[in-house]
Amino acid sequence: QVQLVESGGRLVQAGGSMRLSCAASVRTFSNYLMGWFRQAPGKEREFVAAISWSGITGYADSVKGRFTISRDNAENTVYLQTNSLNPGDTAVYYCAARVHTGVIHNTVRRYDYWGQGTQVTVSS
């Protein structure tokens, strides 16, 4: 069983930055592909970024160049550094995990484990 707990979400002004964290309770963290998704009110949950155990990453076009995903395999933690935030980034951000098969997945249905989410609000 995998448990994921996100933290770090808050209210920030446009142009600001924040780092989201996701702590994973799992026996072998390095076996898992870790992802970040977000869901804005009235919208479907969407892919943000993902990272393999070795550091291979994938990003949504909307966040490329602004967001950076990273992981600390020794601490069982994945991070999402968000820069140049704009009101369109306002959403609940979810951490997700699945056993890694060599593919950087970017769809909700490909992930098996989810955190409870952390709210990110960007004011204009």
Image: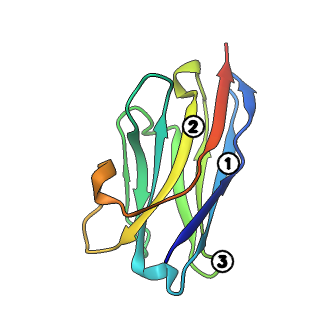
Q: Mark 3 highlights which residue?
A: 75
As drawn, the label of residue 19 is 1
Could you say which quadrant of the image residue 3 lies in?
Answer: bottom right
- Residue that extends furthest to the front in the rendered view of this protein: 1
**Position in image of residue 27 (x %, y %):** 53, 87
- Residue that extends furthest to the top in the rendered view of this protein: 124
Which mark is nearer the camera, 2 or 1? 2
Q: Which residue is painted at 61% across and 48% down in the image? A: 81
Mark yes or no: residue 17 visible.
Answer: yes
Q: Identify the mark nearer the N-term, 3 or 2.
A: 3
Which color scheme is applied? Answer: rainbow
Q: Which residue is painted at 67% across and 48% down in the image? A: 19
Q: Which residue is painted at 50% across and 28% down in the image? A: 40
Q: Mark 2 highlights which residue?
A: 92
| Amino acid residing under circle 3 | Glu
| Amino acid residing under circle 2 | Val
Q: Which residue is painted at 26% across and 72% down in the image? A: 102
Q: Label 1 near label 3: C-beta < 8 Å?
A: no
Taking the image as shown, residue 17 lies to the left or right of residue 71, namely right
Taking the image as shown, residue 118 lies to the left or right of residue 67, namely right
**Position in image of residue 99 (x %, y %):** 35, 74
Relative to 6, is 63 above or below? above
